[in-house]
Image (cartoon, rainbow, N blue to C red):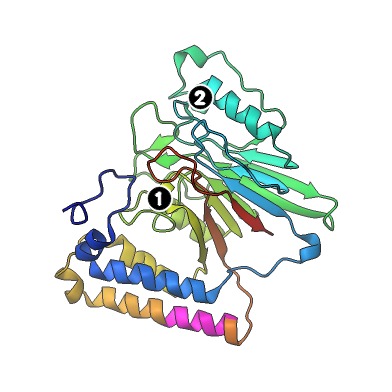
C-alpha cells in the first residue's frame, strides 16, 4: 500500500505507481518530454574552451559543509541555514569564503530567516553578517568581469522569494496565488538565481514551484537559471521556449486528472501530440541540421537529498 498512497510530505515525490494511477497522461508526458530533451541536447551554443567560465552551483546546504569542486564562480541558491539564525548563516559564510573560487555569490532561502525582517529572530535584530567578499544578492543585479578570459563579463540577478510553504519562521514567503514576479527580473542578464524553481521544471509533480516565476521566465529567458528549494527536483533541464514546452506545461497544470478523465480529454491529447511533434522537430534541427540552441539551462542545485538532511547530491558544474 506504500506505493499506492500519496507522498508522505508535500516536499516528497509520489511513487511512480501512484503518479501513473493518478494521471496516466501526465506520467507518460513527463517521461516523453524528458526523453526528447535528452535527444535535443544543450539549449545553448557550445562555449569556446579557450574562454570558458566555470560556474559551480550549490543550494540547500542547511548548515552543513560539503566538498566543492573548483571553478571561477561559486553560486549558492539559498537555504544556507536550518533555523535562520545569524550564527548559522555566519558559519556558512565563513565556510564559503574559505573556498578558492574567484567570485562567490549567494542568495537567501526560506530557512535563512535572518535576511527577512519579518522572520528574523529577536536576538539577531542588532546583529550583522560579515560577508568576507561574498556577493549577497536580494533583488539585485551583479556584473562580474573576467579579464583573463578574453575580457568577458557575466551579469547575475538574485531574488529569494518563494510561494508560502511554512510558518512565520520561514523567510520571504508570499501567498501562492499572489504574483510576486512579473516585471521584476531585468532582461539583460546571463544567470538568474532564485530559491524557488519555476513551476513544473525540476519540480515535484504536484507543483511546489511558482507559476508566476515561470511566466516571468518566458519573458526574460536568461541563459542559465540556478535554484534549489525542492530537493527532489535536483538536476539539470534544458528548455527551448517553444510550443512543445507550452503544451508540456499545460498538461502538468491539469488539476482534475484521473485514470478515467485522462482518456476523455481531447485538448490534453492534442497537447501530448504537440510535445511529440515539436520535440522531434527540435531533434532534427539540432542533430541533423546542426542548428544552435537558443534556450535556457535550468539547474536545481540542492545538495540535500530529498528529506534525508544529508548532503548526498553533488554540486552542479556548468561551463559557459
Does residue 232 lie above or below 223 as drawn?
A: above
Q: Find residue 214 and report its image quarter.
A: bottom left
Which badge, 2 or 1, comes first in the chain's sequence?
2
Give the magenta part as a residue range.
277-286
Quarter of the image with the C terminus in it: bottom right
Is mark 2 in CB contact (under 8 Å) with mark 1? no
Pointer 2: residues within 10 angstroms few (<14), some, or many (20+)?
A: many
Q: Nearer the viewer, residue 285 or 81?
A: 81
- Identity of the residue furthest to the bottom in this view: 288
Is label 2 or label 1 in front?
1
Circle 1 sits in a helix, a strand or a loop, which is it?
A: helix
Does residue 153 lie above or below 180 as drawn?
A: below
- Give the main secondary structure, helix, strand or loop, of the magenta stretch: helix
The residue sitting at 24% across, 65% down in the picture is 20
The residue sitting at 52% across, 27% down in the picture is 115
The residue sitting at 40% across, 50% down in the picture is 232
Q: Nearer the viewer, residue 204 or 165?
A: 204
Q: Which mark is residue 114?
A: 2
Q: Find residue 54 and report its image quarter.
A: bottom right
Residue 21 visible from this viewpoint: yes
x, y (%) of residue 211? 39, 53
Number of marks in the rendered image: 2
x, y (%) of residue 302? 49, 46
Q: Is residue 50 left or right of residue 206?
A: right
- Residue behind mark 1: 232
Amino acid at each position: 500500500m506504500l506505493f499506492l498512497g500519496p507522498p508522505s510530505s508535500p516536499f516528497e515525490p509520489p511513487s511512480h505507481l501512484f503518479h501513473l494511477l493518478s494521471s496516466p497522461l501526465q506520467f507518460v508526458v513527463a517521461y516523453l518530454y524528458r526523453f526528447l530533451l535528452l535527444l535535443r541536447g544543450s539549449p545553448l551554443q557550445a562555449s569556446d574552451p579557450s574562454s570558458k567560465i566555470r560556474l559551480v552551483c550549490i543550494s540547500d546546504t542547511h548548515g552543513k559543509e560539503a566538498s566543492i569542486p573548483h571553478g571561477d564562480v561559486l553560486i549558492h541558491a539559498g537555504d544556507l541555514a536550518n533555523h535562520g539564525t545569524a550564527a548559522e548563516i555566519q558559519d556558512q559564510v565563513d565556510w564559503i569564503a574559505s573556498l578558492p573560487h574567484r567570485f562567490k555569490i549567494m542568495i537567501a532561502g526560506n530557512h535563512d530567516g535572518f535576511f527577512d525582517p519579518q522572520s528574523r529572530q529577536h536576538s539577531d535584530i542588532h546583529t550583522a553578517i560579515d560577508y568576507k567578499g561574498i556577493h549577497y544578492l536580494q533583488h539585485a543585479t551583479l556584473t562580474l568581469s573576467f579579464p583573463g578570459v578574453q575580457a568577458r563579463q557575466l551579469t547575475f540577478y538574485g531574488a529569494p522569494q518563494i510561494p508560502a510553504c511554512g510558518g512565520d519562521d520561514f523567510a520571504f514567503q508570499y501567498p501562492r496565488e499572489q504574483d510576486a514576479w512579473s516585471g521584476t527580473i531585468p532582461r539583460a542578464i546571463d544567470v538568474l538565481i532564485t530559491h524557488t524553481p519555476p513551476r513544473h521544471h525540476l519540480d515535484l509533480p504536484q507543483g511546489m514551484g511558482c507559476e508566476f516565476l515561470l511566466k516571468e521566465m518566458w519573458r526574460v529567458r536568461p541563459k542559465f537559471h540556478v535554484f534549489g528549494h525542492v530537493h527532489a527536483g535536483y538536476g539539470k533541464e534544458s528548455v527551448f521556449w517553444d510550443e512543445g514546452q507550452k503544451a508540456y506545461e499545460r498538461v502538468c497544470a491539469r488539476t482534475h486528472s484521473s485514470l478515467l478523465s485522462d482518456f476523455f480529454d481531447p485538448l490534453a491529447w492534442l497537447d501530448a501530440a504537440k510535445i511529440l511533434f515539436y520535440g522531434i522537430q527540435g531533434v532534427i534541427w539540432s542533430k541533423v541540421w546542426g542548428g544552435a540552441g537558443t534556450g535556457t539551462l535550468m539547474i536545481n542545485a540542492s545538495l540535500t537529498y530529498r528529506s534525508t538532511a544529508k548532503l548526498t547530491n553533488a554540486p552542479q558544474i556548468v561551463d559557459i
